[in-house]
Image (tube, coloured by chain):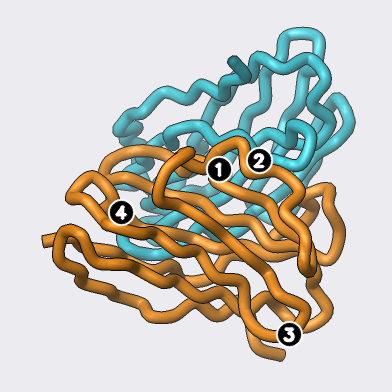
Chain colours: A orange, B cyan
Amino acid sequence: NAGVMQNPRHLVRRRGQEARLRCSPMKGHSHVYWYRQLPEEGLKFMVYLQKENIIDESGMPKERFSAEFPKEGPSILRIQQVVRGDSAAYFCASSAGGSNTEAFFGQGTRLTVV
Amino acid sequence: QKEVEQNSGPLSVPEGAIASLNCTYSDRGSQSFFWYRQYSGKSPELIMFIYSNGDKEDGRFTAQLNKASQYVSLLIRDSQPSDSATYLCAVDSNYQLIWGAGTKLIIKP
């Protein structure tokens, strides 16, 4: 039973390019959460999605960031026109229910903007 | 603003001793409380969750919750060098987990 899969594990982008981060939840999980972790800081909530719906995006920056979780396929976190401050580890977690009970994390995507 | 506070450490504990990690939270409406462990460069992994006031034990780990004081703690008995990591406290608030910045724990052989 595969865990939460994130890809790529490492992503390097030049300033102004787009970054696409993918997250495939655990089998049977329909709730996905995205978090960002800046160096030496704690995790910050970004967005909570269920299949085809954004439930809470209160942690997402208003500009350049978007997320989706289509009916088929992985959840995508998209960052347009990346800047150096976007360099961070981006973690995805999934759960079977919405209460955050036993949410499981993927290995993360380390984004470096050069 | 809803907050979760942890002492950043590092907390240094001798091998075999009890490590005590503390966390306070601001949202009185929170119902679920989680402790995660994160090794450097790795993703967080769930250690325990607790919903009710009192203690919950799982092996060498004990979570303690006091909702009146808005305080949750994690005790690690018989600390091992492999317990050296950053311990993250997280509190459920609506659909989110609100995270503390973590406490770095160092177990000295």
The residue depicted at 63 percent of the width and 65 percent of the height is: A68
Q: Are the residues under badges 2 and 4 in a single subunit?
A: no
Determine which residue is flagged by label 2: B97
Alpha carbon distance from label 3 to label 2: 26 Å
Q: Earlier in the sequence, mark 3 or mark 4?
A: 3
Crowd band around label 2 with a 10 angstrom C-alpha radius: few (<14), some (14–19), many (20+): many
Q: Nearer the viewer, mark 2 or mark 1?
A: 1
Say which amino acid is labelled 4.
Ala
Determine which residue is flagged by label 1: A45
Determine which residue is flagged by label 3: A72
The answer for which chain carries disc 4 is A
Residue A46 in the image: x percent, y percent? 54, 46
Q: Reply above or below: B19 against A101.
A: above
Q: Earlier in the sequence, mark 4 or mark 1?
A: 1
- Numbered label attached to residue A88: 4
* Callout 4 touching callout 1 (CB < 8 Å): no
* Callout 2 touching callout 1 (CB < 8 Å): yes
A30 sits left or right of B89 in the view: right
Crowd band around label 4 with a 10 angstrom C-alpha radius: few (<14), some (14–19), many (20+): some
Residue A39 in the image: x percent, y percent? 26, 46
Residue A9 sits in which quadrant? bottom left
Q: Secondary structure at mark 1?
A: strand
Q: Reply above or below: B63 against A104.
A: above
Q: Secondary structure at mark 3?
A: loop
